[in-house]
Image (tube, grey):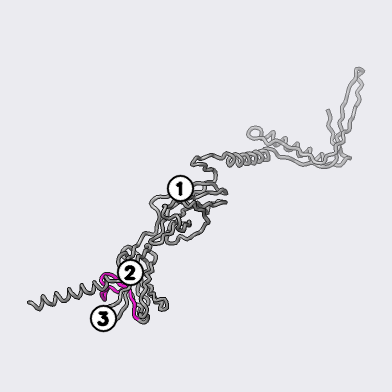
Amino acid sequence: MFSGISLQFTLSSLSLVYLCCVIGAAEIIQVFGYEGKEAKVSCSYDEGYESYEKYLCRNDCGSDDILITTTEARKNRYSISDDKHKWVFTATISNLNQNDAGKYWCGVTRSGKDYYPAEVELKVEKDTCCDSFTKVQSYEGGSVSISCPYESQDQNNMKYICRGNQPSSCVQQFSLTDDKKSKFTVTITSLTQKDSGSYLCGVKRNTGLDVFSAVDLEDILTFFIFSDVVVFNPVVFIVPAARMFILIFTLVVICKYKCHKVQGMFYIQYKCMHTNTNMNTYTQAMHIHVNVNKLYICTVLFSGTAARENRTTTRAADEEEADVRKPKSNPLLVDT
């Protein structure tokens, strides 16, 4: 009976001693990562441990809690490397999820008690932003200024703006101006439809994840935005409408009339018979010479009940055109 109690006390004591050794790590490292991405844990160790095995572990760092060691290099979602010249080993956790958040330990295997140079706190955030966003409107070919606010504590920190809505892949893409008070501004010129979409304003933090705010840019072709007031631009509609009207009118005229082009020289002989008071009849003739460079003789196309008149008029015009082209020896005679 007493031996059982003594054994239980001994195991508890060993567990407490083991935990005390782990808790006595030299420093605490905070690591942040995004879901689906990776997190790197860099652990420094003292000189003299270059040839020792290093590892990353969780919980109580028992044998089942060791995630990766330098003798394996890669295991499942974990990998590790050791820079013996800088006395730093780095463990990488890939494809992060919320279950990866929590406490880790950097460990060095040695005889007796292992050496734990650092305690690690890993936080995993969603790779999306943000719950709210600022909507900005502009027009194609114009320019837009995007203002990004920040807190007073970030006045001297680096600022940047990027396309998209994933903080993990956000890198500086535009030049900006900073008032060093509460906001920085980015101006985009010669806007096209490709410029529309989501943007992220980022502020670099010395510790933890960067701080972001979201902006949604919409390109509008026919509206101008001034001080949040929408002004309609009538020229964009009137000019195309006028051009379309002229085109339709021209097509209607072409379809309405059928024209024949006549070119050359011809003459018309006009003959008239008169009777005087003495009942004597005489003939008076007149010759008309016409020099035509370009003459268009058009016949109107009728519809419905006037179809017969149309055919008659068209045939007369064709006959007239044929007569016009006859040589001078055969003039066109018009008797009255």
Toward the viewer: 180 or 75? 180
Range of residues picked out in magenta: 52-67
Give the residue drawn at x 30%, y 80%.
110
The kind of residue tagged 3 is Gly
The kind of residue tagged 2 is Glu
Which residue bears the numbered disc 2? 27
Mark 1 vs mark 3: which is more N-terminal?
Answer: 3
Toward the viewer: 235 or 278? 235
The secondary structure type at the circle numbered 3 is loop
Q: Give x and y (percent) for residue 246.
A: 65, 39
Marks 1,3: beta carbons within 8 A: no
Q: Give x and y (percent) for residue 109.
A: 31, 79
The secondary structure type at the circle numbered 1 is strand
Which mark is in front, 1 or 3? Answer: 3
Numbered mark located on residue 135 in the image: 1
- Which residue is outermost to the left? 1
Label 3 neighbour load within 10 Å: few <14, some 14-19, many 20+: few
Measure the alpha-carbon separation of dots 1 and 3: 62 Å
The quadrant holding residue 32 is bottom left
The quadrant holding residue 91 is bottom left
The kind of residue tagged 1 is Lys
How many marks overall? Answer: 3
Apparent side of residue 68 relative to residue 317 in the rendered image (left or right): left
